Image: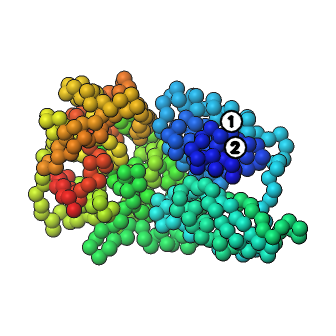
Amino acid sequence: MVLAAAFRRNRDEEQARHHYTAAIRLGQPLAALAGAEMQWALGQTVEAYAWSYAYLDLFAPDPDALETMNRGIRAVRILQQSKDGLNQQQRIRAGRLAAELANSWRLDGPARGAEPAPRPTTRINPSFPAQLAASRQPGWALVMVQIDSRGRVNDVLALEASHDSLATEMVRALREWVFEPPEPGSGNARWFTQAVEFSLDLSDKALREERQARSGAMDADGWIAFDARNGHIAFDVMVNDTPAVAILDTGADTTTISRGLARRAGIGVGRANGMRMSGVFGEQVIPLSDDFQLSFAGLSVPLQDLPIAPGQGFDLVLGRQLFEFSVVQIDYPNRRIRFLDPAAVDFKGNLKVRKTRTGAPLVQAQVDGKKAWMLFDTGNAGDSLFTRTFVARRDLERFKIDENGTSTGGGAIQSGHLTALRIPKFQLGPFPFQGLRASYIATENQGLDARASGTGSRARSARTEFDGIVGYEVLRNFLVTMDLKRNRIHLHLP
C-alpha cells in the first residue's frame, strides 16, 4: 500500500495499480478500495465500477447491510455513481472486468505477509468533517505512524484518503494515540500503516438527535443552509423521524424518494399502481409509497403515493409542487434558501417566463443571438443542455469543443452520451455570458428529442416544448427569486 500510494502521488497509475493488486493478494482489502478511488478520480468509469464491484464481492458479501456497516459504504457510493455513467455495453465490459479482478485477487489460503499493527491502548476518535457529515458521505483514510519504544506517536504521514479533510483529521487524532510498545529488540522506533473507515451510523441515538435538531433549521431571517455538492441544492430534512437529505428540482413534475430512504424510514409500498417515470435518458415503471411524514423548516407535511426511484443520488427529490405554494429564494453564492409567504412578497421578474403543458417553468434566453426557450431547472447539476433538433436548426455543432468533448452523462433512469459545446454568446435576461459551456445528447433515440410522455419527465412528448435546459453552471452566479404560480423569476448578482 505504501508503494502504491507513492506511485499514485507521482501520477504513475500503472505502477500504482500493480502495487494495489499486490497488496490485495497480501490480504489488505483497503488496497482494492483505494484502487477504485483512483480509477474514479481519473475518470475511468468502467474501471471504477469493476474495482468497487470486485471489492464488494470479496470483502463485503452482504450489500443489503452496507448502509449500517463501516466497511464498503464508500465502495457502494463509487459503484452507484460509476454505474450511472455507463451505457449497456460498458456495463457488460465492466462486469467482465470485475469478475476477472475478483478471480485474480482471491486468496487460496489465509492472508499472507500482513504483519499486524500494534494495538492502540489510548485512542482519540477523529472528528468527522462537518461538510461530509452534512451530506452523510462516508470515507476512509490510510496513514503511516511511527511510534517510539514506549508506544507513543513520533510522527504521522497521510498516505491516501477518500477525502483530503478526512486525512487531515486522521493525522490530527493519531498524534494523541498511544500504542502497545514494540517487542524488545525491534529498535527504538517502528513504522506501520493504520487505516480507518469513517461513516455516520444513523442508528446512533446522539447523532440522530443532533441531525434532528438541525434538519432544515432556519436562521433569524428564515434562511436554510444548503450543500451545493455536485451542483444540487441539498439540505437536511426528517422523514418519519429519520434524517435524510433532499434536493430541490423545479424540473421534476413530482417528488420522489430513494429505495434506501424507504428502507431506513420504514416506508412501504402503497396499494396504488406503479408510475411510469421518465428522465432525460430513459424511463421505467416504479412502485409508489405508502404514507409518511416529511419535516423541515418548522413544517411537517404528510405525503403518500410518491415514486420510490432506483439509483437516485439523494434521499428525496422535491419536485415543483413545493414551488407552487411559496416564493422561493435561492442564494447560490451563499448557499442558502428560504420559503416566503406569497401574500407578503411582491417583486417583478427580469426573465420572460412561460410554462409547459405540465407546468414546468420555461425562460427565454438568447443563444448565439437567437431566441431559445429553456427549462429553468434547479435539479440540473451540470452544463446547460440543448436538444439535438435545436443544435441542428441553429448549426451549433460548429461550436463543438473537440473529439475529447464527448462524455457520458447520467439521468434519473439511464445514461447517455453528451457532446460538449462552447457557445460564444449566451444571454439570460439582462445577463450576458461569454463562452458558455453546454452539451447535447448525441445518442440516437435518447435525450430531450426522444422522450415519450410520462410523469416525472423533463420532456413530456416526442416533440419537446423547449429548446434546452439551463441549470447550475449558469444559476450558481445568482440570487434567484421565484414565484412560479405567478410566472415570475428574478435573477440578481449579489
Q: Along the horizontal axis of the image, is 44 left or right of 466?
A: right
- Residues at marks 1 and 2 touching, judged by CB atoms closer than 8 Å: no
Q: Residue 71 carries which label?
A: none
Q: Along the horizontal axis of the image, is 71 left or right of 264?
A: right
Q: Along the horizontal axis of the image, is 487 left or right of 301?
A: left
Using the image, determine if residue 388 lies above or below residue 356: above
Residue sitting at 73 percent across and 34 percent down?
103
Q: Which of 143 and 393 is in front in this view?
A: 143
From where the camera sits, is residue 103 visible?
yes
Give the secondary structure at mark 1: helix
Q: Dot 1 corresponds to which residue?
A: 101
Q: Residue 19 carries which label?
A: 2
Residue 34: image location, x then y, percent? 62, 48
The alpha-carbon separation of the residues under discs 1 and 2 comes to 14 Å
Residue sitting at 51 percent across and 72 percent down?
209
Residue sitting at 29 percent across and 60 percent down?
333
Q: Which amino acid does label 1 sit on?
A: Leu
Q: Quadrant of the C terminus?
A: bottom left
Residue sitting at 19 percent across and 41 percent down?
426
Give the secondary structure at mark 2: helix
The quadrant where residue 465 appears: top left
